[in-house]
């Protein structure tokens, strides 16, 4: 109810209008109900008169009243829905968001329309301008929902849906998957941060430029290459270390800037020193059923090295 964008503000008023109309309808129905308890003489009516009175109630209360209420609400709500449609000839910023069980993939298209910045579980957008979110899913139906900006919109596998949202001013907002999508639906949180246009550009630029995974020692890179790289991409990761001998179609979150993200496991753990190593050891207890296999076969020291190295990956 604490709106920070035009879509959410419109919805706020639709919500109040609906509440007001329903209260009026409820009051009228309640008054009629009390009216039936009134003591009075039963007038003598012919069956024909009875039928006419009954028909009047059915047509008035069952047809005319709902039509008036629904038309009034539609007139009120239609512009709200229209405001959230990306209309043609409009070059709003576009950000692609893909739902996965149970995390968010966020892709920023470059000049050629191909994603050149990919991140996960954190969405950065420019404030004060409309942004078109192009949505889809990699597995089941999820729903994209940033309550303070407006929403929500289903993310359907094999289809693209779009929602236009705008944040009035810079700030950090919570977002949550809005469609039950399996055991860890609750742990499908997304942190949304709106930045001034310049800061947004700077963030994108830093994400394009500064990732330098080579800083790790060869042993850690080899361990990541062997255990993690088949599912997790890290921009600029030296390909000679990648061992991809598993047959799978599961894709894990891009980790290129994982050190800069606010949480781990899409909202399960706050990102702090040592959190990644802890997550790598206990993720199946912290988020049971998540698609990353347990790491019991990898020794703790190696997991700690991988965790420490991943923490350094930040623009
Ligand atoms: Cu994804 Cu619920």
Image (tube, rainbow, N blue to C red):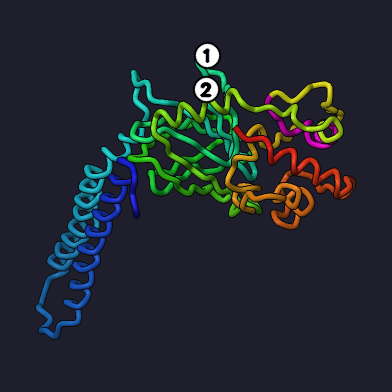
Residue 110 location, x and y as percent?
52, 19
Classify residue 242 by image quadrant: top right
- The magenta region covers 222-235
Tell me if residue 246 can be seen: no
- The relative height of residue 256 versus residue 9 in the rendered view (above or below) is above
What residue sits right under mark 2 in the picture?
109
* Label disc, if present, on residue 112 of the rendered structure: 1
For this view, does 123 lie left or right of residue 45?
right
Q: Secondary structure at mark 2?
A: strand
Position of the N terminus, as image quadrant, is bottom left
Position of the C terminus, as image quadrant, is top right
Residue 193 location, x and y as percent?
46, 41
| Residue toward you, 54 or 140 | 140
For this view, does 295 lie left or right of residue 11?
right
Respond yes or no on whether mark 2 lies under 8 Å from ligand 1. Answer: no
Pointer 2 local density, CA inside 10 Å: few below 14, some 14–19, many at least 20: some
Say which residue appears at 69% left-offset and 41% top-offset.
311
Whether residue 1 is in magenta: the answer is no
For this view, does 223 lie left or right of residue 212?
right
For this view, does 196 lie left or right of residue 57?
right
């Amino acid at each position: 109810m604490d709106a920070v964008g035009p879509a959410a503000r419109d919805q706020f008023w639709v919500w109040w209008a609906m509440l007001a109309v329903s209260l009026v309808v409820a009051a009228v129905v309640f008054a009629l109900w009390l009216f039936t308890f009134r003591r009075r003489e039963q007038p003598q009516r012919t069956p024909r008169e009875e039928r006419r009175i009954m028909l009047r109630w059915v047509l008035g209360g069952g047809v005319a009243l709902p039509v008036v209420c629904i038309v009034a609400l539609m007139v009120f709500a239609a512009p709200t829905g229209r405001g959230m449609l990306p209309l043609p000839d409009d070059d709003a910023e576009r950000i692609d968001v893909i739902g996965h069980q149970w995390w968010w993939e966020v892709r920023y298209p470059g000049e050629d329309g191909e994603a050149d910045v990919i991140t996960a579980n954190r969405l950065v957008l420019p404030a004060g301008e409309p942004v078109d979110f192009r949505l889809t899913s990699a597995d089941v139906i999820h729903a994209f929902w940033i309550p303070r900006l407006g929403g929500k919109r289903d993310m359907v596998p094999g289809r693209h849906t779009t929602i236009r949202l705008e944040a009035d001013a810079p700030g950090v907002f919570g977002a949550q998957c809005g469609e039950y999508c399996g055991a860890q639906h609750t742990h499908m949180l997304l942190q949304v941060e709106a930045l001034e246009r310049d800061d947004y550009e700077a963030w994108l630029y830093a994400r394009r430029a500064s990732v330098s995974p080579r800083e790790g020692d060869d042993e850690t890179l080899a361990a990541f290459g062997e255990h993690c790289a088949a599912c997790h991409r890290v921009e600029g990761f030296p390909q000679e270390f990648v061992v991809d001998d598993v047959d799978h179609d599961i894709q894990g979150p891009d980790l290129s800037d994982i050190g800069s993200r606010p949480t781990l496991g899409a909202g399960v753990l706050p990102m702090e020193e040592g959190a990644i190593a802890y997550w790598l050891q206990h993720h199946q207890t912290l988020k049971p059923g998540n698609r990353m296999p347990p790491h019991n076969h990898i020794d703790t020291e190696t997991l700690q090295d991988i965790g420490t190295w991943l923490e350094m990956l930040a623009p």
